[in-house]
Image (cartoon, rainbow, N blue to C red):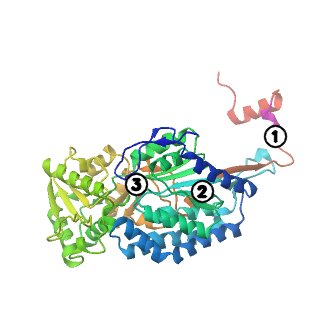
Amino acid sequence: MQAYHAEYYDIDGESLMVAHDDGRSTLIETAIARQRAAHRADPSPGVATRRRRLSALIAMLRDNRARIRAALTEDFGVHPPIMSDLIEIAGGIGRAQYAIDHLDAWIAAEARDVDASFGAATARMEWQPKGVVGNMVPWNFPFEIGIGPLAEMLAAGNRVIVKPSELTPACGALLAKMVAAAFDPDEVTVIEGDQTVGEAFAAASFDHLLFTGSTAVGKAVMRAAAARLTPLTLELGSKSPAILTPSGVDQRAVESIIGLKLAKSGQVCVSADHVFVPADQLDRFIDLARGYFTERAPGFTRSGDCTAIISDRHVDRLQALLADAVAKGGRAIVLEDGAAPSVATRQMPLTLVTGVTPAMRIAQEEIFGPILPVISYTALDDVVAALWAADKPLSIYIFGQDQSEIDGLIARTVSGGVTVNGAALNTACISLGFGGVGASGFGRHHGVEGFREFSNHRAVFVRGPADHADIIFPPYGASAAAAAEAVLGPIAA
């Protein structure tokens, strides 16, 4: 069976795929076959079974808190333990518990209207497990994305195979051990491996596949999956903007934007990639951003709360982005006094860039690091025009006090999600479906949208004892003609 191999890296450190037969698919297909046999034996697990699996997920995360912290530190070099707790561990626990609490409502069939001509017939939509679901995990959130989506996948009654990123080997190895201890392999299993295993994983015979990563790699995954018509959920990179309206430049807004950008040093798909600021308030924005470090985070870049950049290659890329911007007329502003990049720890200070032009790489590429382009504007219409000229983002963050301006921006833009007067909170709310649109992806997980994303939407019609359904079958007589006349009226002359 054909697998896929290539030598390339994009900003997420994932592989763009070029087909080569290397036999790596055998292990994956064996695991799929085992889970598919178990699925056929029990194609619609009961609520009790699904709750048991979700409870095992919660216990697995709670029991391995210290190990998860240690693995993240080993892979990143510097990774805040509290971030590990709040996002990588508590995030998955929250999603699983939410699924447990709402499973009865989610799993219930939904009655649909039936035309009177069908008499006493009934119709309903049922949510059927898809079967064996694959989860391709990025390096930036090995557990939050490695385990979190399992909440909805298992709630929907599926079996799951997880492929961790090769760039976080300690996290991948721990994830495999955790899952093996908590689940039978025909329920959930983990397949580790290098980029060639990931490429074979994308081309394997899953009933559904979730990929989280960059847009470039998402296109390659989609090509690989197309050979089998595998349904996909793609959570892709994007240049998510923050928009400060004229009434929105205040301390709370700036703290939200800067705080989000500092989280994981900007290595987050929903981080604010750039910010639009009214031209006459640009200096105020910069002063407020400096104040964040002076008042709240002095010495941040050398602290244990500043996540390291994942690899030397990623550091080099970010430095090249800054150098390109400065060479093309941009102004780089390091917000923290005395801060500078560290080769030893791969920690980088947050740097604003003003004077941004479309020719700069920071205006074209997803940044995925602690660089924040600040784009000044004179009218909100110009901001809207800029968003329509770019790919549709994963999220938009709008700040302001004028409700008409906020409503206007929401109505005139398109994105996967929106947060008003905050940053990325739409993604933190587990009852809201999370996903992109266009180049930022498609499909949704989190909450009921995730449950339905990983379910087959099965239509069930139960015919009643008396109806007029037979008039649609030939040969057609007077009854069929009368029915057509009643619906459409006489034929126009």
Question: What SS does tag 1 mark?
Answer: loop
Q: Is residue 101 visible?
A: no
Q: Position of residue 392 (x, y in %)?
A: 38, 48
Q: Nearer the viewer, residue 449 or 337?
A: 337
Q: Which residue is mark 3?
A: 394
The main secondary structure of the magenta stretch is helix
* 338 relative to 372 in the view: left or right: left
Q: Nearer the viewer, mark 1 or mark 2?
A: 2
Residue at point 49% right, 67% down?
A: 174
Q: Residues within 10 Å of mark 2 (few under 14, many from 20)?
A: many
Q: Quadrant of the C terminus?
A: top right
**Residue that extends furthest to the right in the rendered view of this protein:** 465
Alpha-carbon span between mark 2 and mark 3 = 20 Å
| Magenta-tinted stretch | 469-473
Q: Position of residue 280 (x, y in %)?
A: 15, 60
Q: Which residue is mark 1?
A: 468
